[in-house]
Image (cartoon, grey):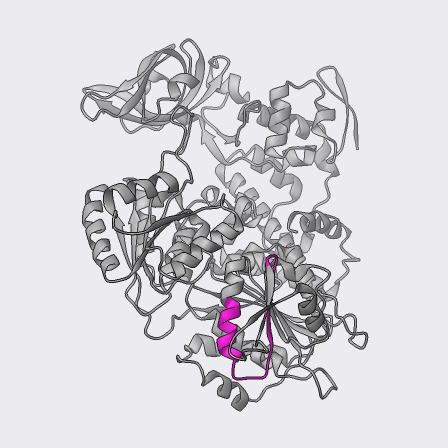
């Protein structure tokens, strides 16, 4: 604890866990709200609130020194501002005259009329953009801007108090209304001057720091917030990137060891038995499917529970792999018994997908004396029916639970309903979780630790676990996020599947594309149309997303483009039963065209839907575009994906071309990771990893090094008795990643 330091007139008693509101009791309400918005609660949070980039004072320029092509930062007064329309193209333009002590320059924002409401004449701002030229005059196009109270008198002294330096790099932090980058910089420096850094214990063991030439925690914090040169900042970022992945790996290796320390059911099937089951399939397995099945069956024969992730593109045949391995389980007797069957629980993210899996498994197992059950929030089913051995029947929930509990139903497919405490198995030996990224770690763990309903079953016996995902992600990310799972890749498509023809459609090619689609519709095919929004945006709302909406686009298409075809809509605001009805009509070809949001990314298979239009494609990530495109590769008919985009930016066009040219989702995921900067990966939102951690994900050597070190520590000291600092920090990491 640091005592006796004084900031202003406030005596400070400060620790890492000290709350910011106690350290800074007299903060304006806007800053308090910003603390909450940015997730800054403690002094430690602020120390770990890293710069998003670093600026150089050479970027700060006076208006008189600007030249075409510059991308400067200028501080200026808004001398005048108005909104109107261009004379030629009639597009909305907001024009402002910016003024500093050296001169004036025009700023122009295209298609952003709300800017005029946000910036007032006579106010001051910080502007950053590209200097262009029009009619012999310089202007800044679409500059980023932030309101400030006044213009700094000089860059060195007034900004970062380094007045004797010709130029230097300075941190630029993500800002929010109430907290500026400058405030964060000065506040972090005050924390440094308090001596608190001397109290921080390094969570990474010294031998690991030395082995990989990583700076200490104290040095890293100083270098990342106040670097003297760019190499200092890079070294610090490397250290914190390694640290983040290292602790995720520690957590995952610990979870894996805990799980595998429990006994499981040993399942052994002869090669002949498995081949006999597979030979009934109306298609030939790919080598990737055969390899995946063999890996899983080998895991079944070991003395510990399997934890495996099966990752493959949409349509790569994961269900066939799952069905074959379920066959091995469902036809195996419990340990030491001559009657009954081992059981499988198969969890899907949506009811409509669970129903489709139920129908698929009926086809796989109809020739065997094996019952298949379905449980969702809207009802239960069982195959076969007593009255009709070739079909299923609706049954009561209590009856289904009774049969599952006494082992009469070896295969149970369902949604989240499977996790409920009332669902108990007699001999649960295998758990499959489909589209596993849609379930949290806790849900996965609950499913894998389902209570057995048999007193003779060992209480600590756990089922084998297979997670499946149709979202290809880079290998480095898979090794990190799913570090507790062994990885199997399905990187081949079934024989006969034709590659999807993907076309990038610019506005001038839309009519020709619609004509082609009409011909396909006439031949009986169906069409998905994906829009980024549900409703039309408020035209008066600042920063509203100016993209097509499901409701308006469906109406326009019916009136102007496809008047002779049935069009329906699907989006997240519909009730579950309404979604099911819409998808069922589309599946049965009662609807020709389905206009939807990305809610169809994971959904029912519609083999006859061989076309998809993705509106505003630049608004979606590559992985999501690939997932959406995967909706139309459910048959051997030629499939077409039309990527509608108005963008002209080079980077976006490169991304869309990659979607067109990539051979599979894994190649696309790697391309996406390498193409985009860490700040654009949205790692924190999607995976729980910070942007700095995502930098490590781009480096396979760093991920493998962190994984190796984590494995060694857990192997020799599972309870971390000799690593108290690691144990303490790991507790916080575990809470974050649950």
Q: Which one is in front, 223 or 316?
A: 316
Residue 720 shows in this picture: yes
**The stretch drawn in magenta includes residue 527:** no
Please check the rendered image and state whether residue 366 is part of the magenta-colored stretch, yes or no. yes
Towards the viewer: 79 or 612: 612
At x 57% / y 48%, what residue is drawn?
A: 689
The reply, left or right, for residue 513 in relation to residue 26 is: left
Instruction: Give the farthest residue toward the bottom.
Output: 272
Q: Quadrant of residue 51?
A: top right
84 up-or-down from 685: above or below: above
Residue 711 screen position, x and y as percent: 65, 63
Using the rendered view, name the quadrant where residue 436 is placed. bottom right
Residue interval drawn in magenta: 357-378
Q: Quadrant of the N terminus?
A: top right
Q: Position of residue 602 (x, y in %)?
A: 47, 56
Query: Where does residue 366 sit, x and y in percent of width and height?
Result: 52, 80
Q: How many marks?
A: 0
* Left or right of residue 676, residue 342 in this image: right
Q: Nearer the viewer, residue 174 or 238?
A: 174
Tell which of 654 and 384 is nearer to you: 384
- State the residue at coordinates (80%, 58%): 721
311 horizontally vs 43: left or right: left
The residue positioned 49% from the left and 12% from the top of the image is: 150
Decide if residue 72 is in sight here. no
Q: Is residue 443 above or below residue 333?
A: above
Q: Is residue 391 above or below residue 719?
A: below
Q: Position of residue 53 (x, y in %)?
A: 48, 35
Q: Which residue shows up at 58% across the image and 23% down it? A: 183
């Amino acid at each position: 604890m640091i005592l006796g330091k004084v900031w202003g007139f406030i005596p400070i008693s400060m620790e890492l866990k000290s709350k910011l509101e106690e350290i800074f009791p007299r903060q304006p309400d806007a800053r308090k709200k910003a603390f909450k918005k940015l997730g800054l609660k403690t002094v430690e949070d602020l120390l770990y609130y890293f710069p998003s980039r670093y600026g150089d004072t050479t970027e700060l320029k006076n208006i008189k020194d600007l030249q075409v092509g510059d991308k400067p930062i200028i501080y200026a007064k808004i001398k005048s501002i108005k909104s109107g329309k261009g004379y030629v193209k009639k597009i909305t333009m907001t024009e402002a005259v910016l003024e500093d002590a050296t001169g004036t320059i025009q700023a122009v924002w295209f298609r952003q009329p709300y800017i005029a409401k946000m910036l007032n004449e006579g106010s001051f701002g910080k502007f950053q953009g590209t200097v262009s030229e029009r009619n012999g005059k310089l202007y800044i196009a679409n500059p980023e801007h932030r309101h400030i109270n006044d213009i700094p008198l000089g860059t060195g002294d007034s900004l970062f108090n380094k007045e004797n330096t010709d130029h230097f790099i300075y941190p630029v932090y993500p800002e929010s209304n109430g907290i500026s980058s400058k405030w964060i910089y000065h506040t972090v420096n005050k924390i440094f001057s308090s001596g608190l850094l001397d109290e921080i214990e390094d969570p990474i063991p010294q031998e690991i720091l030395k082995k990989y030439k990583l700076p200490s925690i104290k040095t890293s914090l100083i270098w990342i917030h106040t670097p003297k040169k760019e190499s200092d900042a890079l070294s610090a970022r490397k250290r914190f990137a390694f640290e983040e992945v290292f602790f995720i790996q520690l957590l995952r290796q610990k979870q894996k060891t805990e799980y595998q320390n429990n006994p499981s059911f040993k399942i052994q099937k002869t090669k002949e038995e498995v081949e006999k089951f597979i030979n009934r399939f109306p298609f030939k397995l790919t080598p990737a499917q055969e390899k995946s099945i063999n890996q899983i069956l080998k895991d079944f024969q070991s003395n510990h529970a399997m934890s495996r992730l099966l990752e493959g593109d949409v349509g790569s045949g994961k269900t066939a792999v799952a069905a074959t391995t379920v066959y091995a389980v469902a036809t195996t007797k419990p340990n030491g018994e001559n009657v009954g069957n081992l059981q499988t629980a198969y969890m899907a993210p949506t009811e409509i997908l669970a129903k489709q899996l139920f129908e698929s498994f009926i086809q796989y197992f109809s020739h065997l004396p094996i019952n298949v059950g379905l449980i969702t929030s809207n009802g239960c089913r069982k195959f076969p029916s007593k009255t009709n051995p070739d079909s299923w029947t609706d049954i009561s929930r209590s009856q289904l639970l009774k049969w599952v509990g006494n082992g009469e139903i070896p295969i149970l497919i369902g949604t989240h309903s499977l996790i409920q405490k009332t669902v108990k198995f007699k001999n649960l030996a295998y758990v499959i979780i489909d589209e596993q990224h849609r379930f949290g770690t806790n849900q996965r763990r609950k499913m894998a630790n389902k209570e057995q309903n048999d007193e003779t079953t060992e209480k600590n016996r756990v089922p084998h676990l297979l997670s499946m995902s149709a979202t290809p992600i880079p290998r480095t990310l898979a090794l990190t996020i799913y570090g507790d799972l062994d990885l199997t890749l399905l990187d081949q498509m079934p024989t006969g599947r034709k590659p999807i023809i993907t076309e990038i459609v610019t506005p001038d090619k839309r009519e020709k594309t619609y004509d082609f689609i009409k011909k396909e519709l006439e031949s009986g095919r169906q069409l998905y149309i994906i829009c980024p929004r549900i409703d039309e945006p408020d035209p008066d709302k600042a920063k509203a997303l100016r993209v097509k909406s499901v409701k308006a686009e469906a109406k326009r298409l019916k009136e102007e483009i496809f008047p002779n075809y049935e069009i329906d809509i699907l989006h997240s605001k519909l009730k579950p039963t309404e979604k099911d009805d819409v998808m069922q009509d589309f599946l049965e070809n009662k609807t020709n065209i389905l206009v939807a949001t990305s809610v169809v990314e994971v959904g029912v298979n519609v083999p006859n839907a061989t076309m998809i239009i993705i509106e505003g494609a630049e608004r979606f990530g590559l992985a999501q575009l690939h997932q959406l495109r995967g909706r139309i590769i459910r048959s051997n008919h030629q499939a077409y994906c039309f990527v509608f985009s108005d963008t002209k930016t080079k980077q976006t066009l490169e991304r869309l071309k990659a979607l067109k040219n990539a051979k599979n989702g894994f190649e696309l995921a790697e391309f996406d990771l390498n193409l985009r900067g860490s700040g654009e990966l949205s790692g924190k939102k999607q995976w729980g990893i910070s942007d700095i951690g995502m930098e490590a994900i781009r480096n396979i050597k760093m991920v493998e090094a962190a994984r190796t070190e984590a494995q060694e520590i857990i192997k020799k000291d599972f309870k971390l008795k000799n690593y108290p600092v690691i144990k303490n920090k790991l507790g916080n990491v575990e809470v974050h990643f649950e």
